[in-house]
Image (cartoon, rainbow, N blue to C red):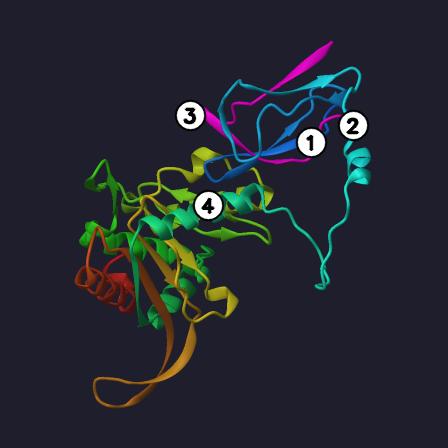
């Protein structure tokens, strides 16, 4: 007697899943609830657990292959008729060379999914990046004002709103190529990169154009917590129209990010540093300055709209109360 193991449905819209890593080999003894494989759907990684105790049967789906939800991917057998992985490994001759190996880590799971998507982005989207500096002194003052009212905002919260304002002025950057058509989106759905030690997630805050700073902050905090708890769903990382990568907390000045397809642009934000600048009266002042780098798809736009977008963002950041409150 054997028990089927099927590709599970891990979301209302999930139609297919990809086997990225079998954690067990054919013939291995299996306990009920033991993890058999890692799968992905879009950018989210999941695990498949064994429905019963026994031995792992033939692997019907290879690593890297995608199959429909419900497809039988293997069986749990009462008895093993296949050599275990430990038995098989004893028969294999170990191959070494002069290089000492510290560790071998499988290139699989969410790491491989991210790599494949970024490779596709570079291969299919001609990308160029422009960088400028922006004075965020008044943004920091605004953040402090909210804090004094017991309303804690992060710089990322404010950057999300500022970006949405700039996209409203330059909607060509809030677009994608779909079926050989450049589609400009009315909704501004901003994905924000949240990195863990071994993976990157991009939860999406939808309809930012209709939300105030507090609503944006609450949405982002809730999504970031789900990423840290690893309870974020595929649905919560879909429908993005633009992406922000804020690396400022890591003491990084300039980031050349890769576009998250099928979007047409991504904004990278560097760390904030105090710099001496000359004001309009040629007087020296100390300002908090950060870097903004916009990477755009040259199939969709050329340099001038990118330059204008960055200039408009700088204008908002230097006078945030006039634009985002």
Tags 4 and 2 touching, CB below 8 Å:
no
Count the marks: how many?
4
Which element carries disc 3, helix, strand or loop? loop
Mark 2 vs mark 3, foreground winner is 2
Residue at 49% from the left image edge and 25% from the top image edge: 67
Q: CA distance from mark 3 to mark 4?
A: 22 Å
- Residue 225 is at least partly visible in this image: no
In the figure, residue 80 lies in which quadrant? top right
Q: Which residue is mark 1?
A: 35
Which sits earlier in the primary sequence, circle 2 or circle 3? 3
Quadrant position of the C terminus in the picture: bottom left
- Residue 283 is at least partly visible in this image: yes
Q: Nearer the viewer, residue 271 or 14?
A: 14
Q: CA distance from mark 4 to mark 1?
A: 24 Å
How many residues crowd around disc 1 within 10 Å: few (fewer than 14), some, or many (20 or more)?
some
Q: Which mark, by number, is residue 116? A: 4
In x, y percent, where is residue 145? 40, 63
Magenta part of the protein: which range?
A: 1-30
């Amino acid at each position: 007697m054997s028990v089927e193991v099927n590709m599970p449905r891990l979301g209302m819209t999930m139609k297919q899943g990809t086997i990225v890593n079998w954690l067990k080999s054919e013939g291995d003894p299996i306990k009920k609830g033991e993890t058999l494989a890692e799968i992905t759907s879009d950018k989210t990684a999941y695990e498949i657990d064994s429905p019963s105790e026994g031995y792992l049967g033939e692997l019907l789906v290879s690593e890297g292959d995608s199959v429909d939800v419900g497809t039988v991917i293997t069986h749990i057998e009462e008895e093993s008729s296949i050599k275990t992985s430990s038995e098989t490994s004893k028969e294999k001759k170990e191959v070494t060379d002069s290089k000492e190996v510290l560790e071998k880590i499988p290139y699989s799971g969410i790491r491989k999914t991210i790599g494949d998507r970024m490779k596709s982005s570079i291969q299919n989207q001609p990308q160029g990046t422009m960088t400028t500096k922006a004075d965020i002194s008044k943004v920091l003052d605004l953040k402090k004002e909210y804090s004094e009212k017991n309303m804690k905002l992060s710089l990322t919260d404010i950057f999300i709103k500022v970006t949405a304002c700039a996209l409203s002025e330059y909607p060509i950057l809030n677009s994608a190529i779909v079926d050989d058509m450049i589609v400009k989106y009315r909704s501004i759905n901003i994905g924000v990169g949240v990195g863990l030690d071994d993976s990157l997630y991009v939860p999406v805050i939808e309809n930012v154009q209709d939300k105030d700073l507090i609503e944006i902050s609450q949405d982002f905090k809730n999504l970031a917590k789900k990423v840290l708890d690893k309870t974020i769903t595929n649905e919560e990382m879909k429908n993005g129209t633009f992406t922000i990568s804020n690396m400022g907390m890591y003491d990084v000045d300039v980031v050349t990010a890769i576009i998250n397809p099928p979007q047409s642009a991504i904004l990278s934000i560097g760390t904030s540093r105090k710099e001496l600048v000359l004001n309009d009266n040629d007087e020296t002042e100390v300002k908090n300055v950060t870097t903004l780098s916009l990477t755009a798809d040259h199939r969709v736009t050329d340099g001038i709209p990118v330059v204008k977008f960055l200039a408009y963002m700088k204008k908002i950041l230097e006078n945030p109360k006039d634009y985002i409150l």
